[in-house]
Amino acid sequence: MIRVVLADDQTMVRTGFRVILELAGDIEVVGEASDGPAAVALARRLNPDVICMDVRMPGGNGLAATREIVDGAAPGASPAVLVVTTFDLDEYVFGALEAGASGFVLKDTEPDNLVDAVRRLAGGHGLLDQTVTRRVIAEFARRRPAPIAEPVAAQQLTARETDIVRLLARGLSNAEIAAELVIETTTVKSHLGRAMTKIGVRDRVQTVVWAYRNGMVPRDGG
């Protein structure tokens, strides 16, 4: 059973999400919070698999709460944070990913997409709404956060793992990476999984963040 905490200042939104998620059969909503600090407290007390986090809430926003939850958890023990918001803005998406979120969907997404997003994050797969994925990659490229290089982690990657991480950071899917490197998709998944373990991230989305922070992607994205 996937254990979920809902964080949103609107009771009706939380109620709707609870109904949608629990109808899936393999998801249980174990707690609800109406602001960021309450979400942080529930995350620490309940240790859920996924937190559905609103961005803007009175008394503490979702981005600050996400950062506190991710930074305060033991390595590998942080809940996956799915940012769910009405704001289709790069600023919010970028801020959420920088804070450590594993996924981002809009509040008007279809119910099945919300369920799928929770399942993907619980399984260790990051997710971005399809309408914003490429724009977010472009935003990373434009901003180029100051590298906070982790040479030990980077040096542990094999040449093939490095190639795959770089292509992932350019926005390519597993199938596109496989075609680019002339290898099987299953091989891409295996190499990427090992690379994620070595650099200490839990999903594809945070792998992209790590790649840009460590200067692994040329300025032109090539």
Image: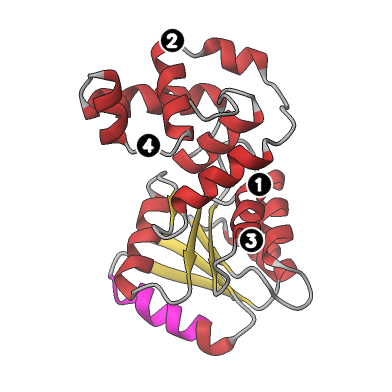
Q: Which residue is mark 1?
A: 98
**Mark 2 / mark 4, whichever is N-terminal:** 2
In magenta, the rendered stretch is 14-24
**Mark 3 / mark 1, whichever is N-terminal:** 3
User: What amino acid is at disc 1?
Assistant: Glu
**Mark 2 / mark 1, whichever is N-terminal:** 1
Q: Residue at x 33, y 61 (%)?
A: 116
Whether residue 27 is visible, yes or no, is no
Left or right: 98 with respect to 12? Answer: right
**Mark 4 / mark 3, whichever is N-terminal:** 3
Which is the main secondary structure of the residues drawn in magenta? helix
Q: Is residue 172 above or below residue 88?
A: above
User: What amino acid is at disc 3?
Assistant: Tyr
Circle 2 SS class: helix
Q: Which residue is mark 2?
A: 159
Residue 49: horizontal and vertical position, in percent? Answer: 48, 55
User: Is the residue under label 1 in contact with that under label 3 (CB below 8 Å)?
Assistant: no
- Mark number, residue 172: 4
User: What amino acid is at disc 2?
Assistant: Ala
Q: Which residue is mark 3?
A: 92
Q: CA distance from mark 2 to mark 4?
A: 18 Å
Whether residue 35 is visible, yes or no, is yes
Q: CA distance from mark 3 to mark 1?
A: 10 Å
Q: Quadrant of residue 19?
A: bottom left
Q: Residue at x 67, y 49 (%)?
A: 99
Q: CA distance from mark 4 to mark 3?
A: 22 Å
Q: Residue at x 62, y 55 (%)?
A: 96
The N terminus - image quarter: bottom left
Q: Is residue 193 above or below residue 18?
A: above
Residue at far front of view: 220
